[in-house]
Image (cartoon, helix red, strand yellow):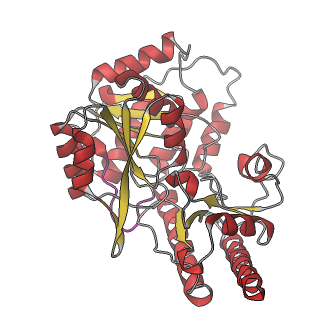
């Protein structure tokens, strides 16, 4: 029904992934696996709904405060996550990162601490530092077959009065960890005890494959100092149409966000095309998400099999519980991050996510976007193999 193996040419479409690579890598002549943007077709129901809306001769100021916006979100959370979200708890915002930034600015002062799990989505780190707050690391630890939180350390961090917010990324970028119900309950217990506000970025919520995604919205009846922020961008591949929505029972935070958007930023309404996209995606897109996850699961298995066959003594990879991002460890190779990063660029001609931007220090990981056609993924893996073969050959020559 959905052809996720069709190779689509995205060059010369003002696409960041292809046409703006040179701003990061110094060239656009690389095969891109870096940014979390799928090379897979957007859900057709969305493009059809947008095209239908464009047949109307006027595109004017639009409101999100109608059932066209609220009902599809409520339906999605009810049918996918078994959570009854109330209309009065839902708000609209320009982007997920805008929401996170504004809540940080609202609830903390300069030099206060913001707790994040590391490795962390790099934008969290830059926006915390950009707003003169302190990044407080709560490292995820690899334990046998999955990443775990050290709750003793996390509780210690939450007890410090200057640490006022915890940003939870679930499913977690870049590790792919999906937090269990038990883990989420423990997080809420610790945060409630220490009056720490929880911002849950659930932008990858529809990519939980090894276990069910449990939204922090489920925990709100017992602790109201929680805000969930998400959007359609990752799930339905419309990241170029900026939008988001949030869910919270903290109505002070909700009203303050609405006030800030109107009086400080002059943001008076919602993108009318996004309203149609939300309606189409959340009422009609269930089969698309299921098929998409099956494709990504297959691609993760391809990565796993390829590494075991060709790079077993070089790379270590554990299939993620969620997201479409592969977090790959090259520690066994013995090469430094700068050696691997430069070689992938100059030899393999491939752009990957450099591990240190997620960990604030040199690492032995890189992030690979697996949301691509199978043929593209295999070519990328061949380029990685060539890179390490060449590195080994050069090392042996010395």
- Residue at (35%, 64%) from the top-left corner? 141
Q: Is residue 141 above or below residue 15?
A: below
Does residue 120 appear left or right of residue 78 in this picture? right
Q: Quadrant of the C terminus?
A: bottom right
Residue 249 pos. (x, y %): 26, 29
- Residue at (43%, 53%) from the top-left corner? 118
Does residue 337 appear left or right of residue 108 in this picture? right
- Residue at (50%, 71%) from the top-left corner? 297
* Front position in the image: 229 or 59: 229
Residue 326 pos. (x, y %): 54, 66
* Front position in the image: 75 or 294: 294
* Front position in the image: 228 or 277: 228
Q: Is residue 69 above or below residue 11?
A: above
User: Please, which residue is most extreme toward the front here?
Assistant: 398
Q: Which residues are magenta?
A: 207-215
Q: Is residue 23 above or below residue 266?
A: below
Does residue 371 appear left or right of residue 225 in this picture? right
Q: Is residue 95 visible?
A: no
Q: Quadrant of the N terminus?
A: bottom right
Task: Tell me where residue 341 sits by quadrant.
Answer: bottom right
Q: Count the marks.
A: 0
Task: Tell me where residue 391 sits by quadrant.
Answer: bottom right
Residue 268 pos. (x, y %): 53, 15
Q: Is residue 111 visible?
A: yes
Residue 256 pos. (x, y %): 38, 17
**Within the magenta stretch, is there residue 94?**
no
- Residue at (79%, 61%) from the top-left corner? 30
Q: What secondary structure predominates along the stretch shown in magenta?
A: loop
């Amino acid at each position: 029904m959905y052809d996720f193996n069709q190779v689509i040419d995205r060059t010369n479409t003002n696409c960041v992934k292809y046409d703006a690579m040179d701003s990061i890598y110094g060239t656009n002549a690389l095969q891109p696996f870096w940014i979390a943007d799928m090379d897979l077709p957007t859900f057709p129901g969305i493009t059809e709904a947008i095209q239908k809306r464009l047949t109307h001769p006027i595109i004017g100021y639009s409101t999100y405060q109608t059932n066209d916006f609220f009902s599809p979100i409520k339906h999605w959370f009810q049918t996918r996550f078994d959570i009854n979200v109330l209309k009065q708890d839902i708000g609209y915002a320009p982007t997920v990162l805008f929401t996170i930034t504004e809540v940080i600015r609202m609830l903390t002062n300069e030099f206060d601490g913001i707790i994040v799990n590391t490795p962390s989505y790099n934008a969290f780190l830059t926006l915390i530092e950009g707003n003169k707050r302190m990044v407080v690391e709560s490292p995820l630890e690899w334990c046998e077959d999955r990443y775990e939180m050290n709750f003793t350390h996390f509780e210690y961090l939450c007890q410090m009065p200057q640490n006022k917010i915890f940003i939870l990324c679930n499913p977690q970028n870049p590790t792919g960890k999906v937090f269990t119900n038990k883990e989420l309950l423990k997080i809420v217990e610790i945060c409630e005890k220490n009056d720490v506000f929880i911002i849950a970025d659930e932008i990858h919520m529809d990519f939980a494959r090894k276990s069910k995604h449990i939204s922090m919205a489920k925990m709100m009846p017992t602790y109201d100092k929680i805000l969930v922020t998400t959007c359609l961008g990752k799930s339905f591949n419309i990241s170029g149409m900026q939008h988001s929505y949030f869910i919270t029972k903290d109505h002070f935070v909700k009203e303050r966000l609405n006030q800030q958007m109107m009086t400080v930023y002059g943001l008076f309404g919602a993108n009318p095309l996004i309203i149609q996209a939300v309606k189409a995606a959340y009422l009609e897109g269930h089969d698309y998400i299921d098929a998409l996850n099956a494709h990504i699961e297959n691609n993760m298995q391809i990565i796993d099999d390829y590494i075991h066959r060709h790079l077993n003594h070089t790379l270590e990879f554990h299939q993620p519980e969620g997201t479409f991002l592969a977090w790959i460890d090259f520690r066994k190779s013995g090469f430094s991050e700068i050696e691997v990063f430069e070689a992938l660029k100059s030899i393999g001609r491939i752009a990957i996510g450099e591990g240190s931007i997620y960990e604030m220090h040199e690492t032995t990981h890189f992030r690979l976007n697996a949301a691509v056609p199978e043929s593209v993924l295999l070519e990328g893996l061949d380029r990685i193999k060539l890179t390490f073969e060449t590195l080994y050959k050069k090392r042996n020559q010395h």
